[in-house]
Image (cartoon, grey):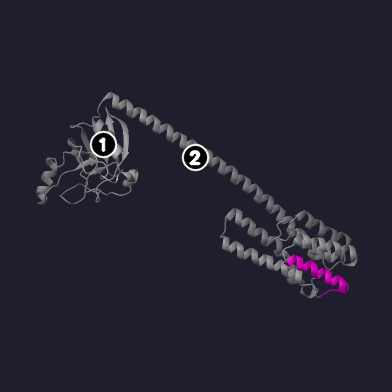
Amino acid sequence: MILPRGKEMRDQNILHIVLSEGYRQSSAYIVRKQSKVSDYRYFFCICMTVTSILLCGCSHFDGGYQAKSTFEEANDLFNQGSYKASLNKYEQIIEKYPSTADRVLFEMGIIYAYPKNEQKDYQKALECFQKLIKDYPGSGYRQDSEMMIFNINNAIIKDKTIATQQTQIETLQQEVKRKENEVLTLHKNIEALEQKVFAFAIKMGAVDKILIEKKERRLMLISKGEVIKTYKIALGGNPIGQKERQGDNKTPEGIYFIDSRNKDSHYHLSLHISYPNERDKKRAKGLGVSPGGNIMIHGIKNGFSWVGDSHTEVNWTKGCIAVTDKEIEEISKLAPNGTIVEIRP
């Protein structure tokens, strides 16, 4: 792993990216959440770069055949991913061949700082490079070691920053979870209160008005000017605008009343609305068409009650106002024949 001085600039650039690029990738994963494929390719390139560092000097060695062979064994262990065994081999080399200590310290520092080494230890890497600089000031590895120290210190700072950000993220996630639980509790309390109000309204007697707002797609039961319950509804398949003729799939707009009900409806239960009124008839006559009729507030078609609230995702009726089966049962109990029905645009 001796670095030939003729290629010094290239090797310095390689050393410079060993940590800075590795930690840029790590930071991006945590903070920016880049794609797994891009992270993998990027990390692979970094690992291959470091591997080339550990391999590039094996043929350039002047410490004797036996020492060279031992270095090759250490490099082979590194290439196999046996980083601890490789470090142990380098420790044996420095004991047997003290003249190669600067090279050994440099290569051990690289292994300790190697991004793919799961047991990497930046403090030990710093100790290796610092000892090399102190004990071997004339070593050809001095300048590269100084650069590695610079990059490792930057990596440590980035690590601390990432750890701090991760802690902040976890704290915020916990706060969001707490708020979600609070909101859920509030929803449950509101639902319980609505049920109490509704139960009270049932005890007090019938509602005096049903207000339907087409744009908002909601039906409200009103008693003495107060809304006691609101329902989400589905309308005719062509909901915008006033109903003008039979078959236009529009829900009418105006003031009507419940004039009858059908307990044997094909839509669970149904309350018939007094459409067309005189204004509707006059409009249709002017257009030379039939105004149509049979407009109801009803439940879901028999056999399909299992769809529940999801039926309101589309406007599926031919001009009627649809709610769930449970809801039409509630409305039917509270809205007797004669109850005013106001339908707004």
Query: Residues under labels 1 and 2: Cα distance?
Result: 33 Å
Residue 304 lies, in percent from the top left, at 29, 46
Q: Is residue 245 above or below residue 142?
A: above
Q: Which residue is mark 1?
A: 211
Residue 227 lies, in percent from the top left, at 31, 32
Asked if residue 307 is among those painted magenta in the image, a careful observer would answer no
Q: Is residue 8 above or below residue 281?
A: below
- Splitting the image into 4 quarters, where does residue 21 fall? bottom right
Q: Nearer the viewer, residue 118 or 7?
A: 118
Under tag 2, what secondary structure? Answer: helix
- In screen coordinates, is 161 left or right of 98? left
Magenta stretch: give its range: 60-79
Q: Is residue 52 above or below residue 194?
A: below
Kind of residue at disc 1: Leu
Residue 67 visible to an observer of this rendering:
yes
Residue placed at 81% from the left, 56% from the top? 127
Q: Which residue is mark 2?
A: 180
Q: Is residue 321 above or below residue 201?
A: below
